[in-house]
Image (cartoon, rainbow, N blue to C red):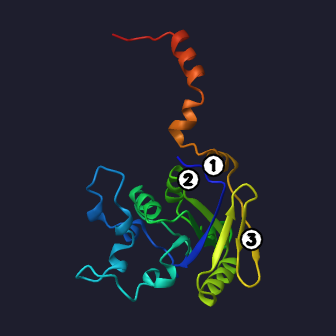
Amino acid sequence: MEAFTTHRGILAPLDRANVDTDQIIPKQFLKSIARTGFGPSAFFDWRYVLNGDPNPEFELNAPRYADRSLLVTRNNFGCGSSREHAVWALAQDGYKVIIAPYRGEGDDYIPGFADIFKNNCSKNGVVTIELSEAEVETIFQAVYGEEGLEATVDLEKQQLTLHGETEITFDFDYDPSVKNKLLKGLDDIEESLLYLEDIEKFEQTHATWIHQ
């Protein structure tokens, strides 16, 4: 997996809450056993009209967002089924970072991202950033107000900076263990291989019992 340290790119807005994985990558695209080719099908039902042409009313089809690599959206992004294809589609469509707001506390808490989707993102090198609703609203207004607005994510410093007429920086929390793997470009298998010598030593010395 490619290491993630910093990334600068154009921000695009998806002003919708509760976007589920079937909306990110519809079920008809889950037949492939390969992990490639999903990018053009991301947000398929919104992205295209019936004859296959781009839907001009879908916000991410606007020419100003053609080269985007960061996405700002609303609460509970990636809910629904646990399909990892949703993350593959977003990553292959060029997204390196997704930003979403959390809301409330305790029993009233609504996350920025569904847990399984968030975990799948980290395993595929996509950084998910949760901010407050007020902070995310500031980002939406900045994106709408300035064409081609760029932002930089510094994972080491845990900062998101908007490069508008006036630069705005947001601090975000990140799980230390997940952050470490992203900074080093380690997926779960690559992390396990760091301990290959210990694993082999254990296998050589561990008594194996077979019950008849």
* Mark 1 surroundings: few (<14), some (14-19) or many (≥20) residues within 10 A: some
| Mark toward the start of the polypeptide (3 vs 2) | 2
**In the visual, does 170 lie left or right of 113?**
right
Type of amino acid at the residue the image marks with label 1: Val
Q: Residue at x 33, y 77 (%)?
A: 45
Q: Is residue 117 above or below residue 99?
A: above
**Residue at 76% in and 77% down:** 168
Q: Earlier in the sequence, mark 1 or mark 2?
A: 2
Residue 189's spot in the image, x, y percent? Answer: 50, 37
**Mark number for residue 122?**
2
Q: Residue 126 versus residue 166: which sits nearer the camera?
A: 166
Whether residue 123 appears in this view of the structure is yes
Q: Amino acid at mark 3?
A: Phe
Q: Secondary structure at mark 3?
A: strand
Residue 133 vs residue 99, the one in the foreground: 99
Q: Tell whether 210 sits left or right of 97.
A: left
Q: Could you tell me if the residues under marks 1 and 2 are in contact, i.e. CB atoms within 8 Å?
A: yes
Crowding at label 3, few (<14), some or many (≥20) Cα neighbours within 10 Å? some
Disc number for residue 35: none
Whether residue 117 sits left or right of residue 99 in the image: it is left
Q: Which mark is residue 170?
A: 3
Residue marked by disc 1: 178
> Residue 114 in the image: x percent, y percent?
52, 63
Answer whether residue 16 is visible to the viewer in this image: no
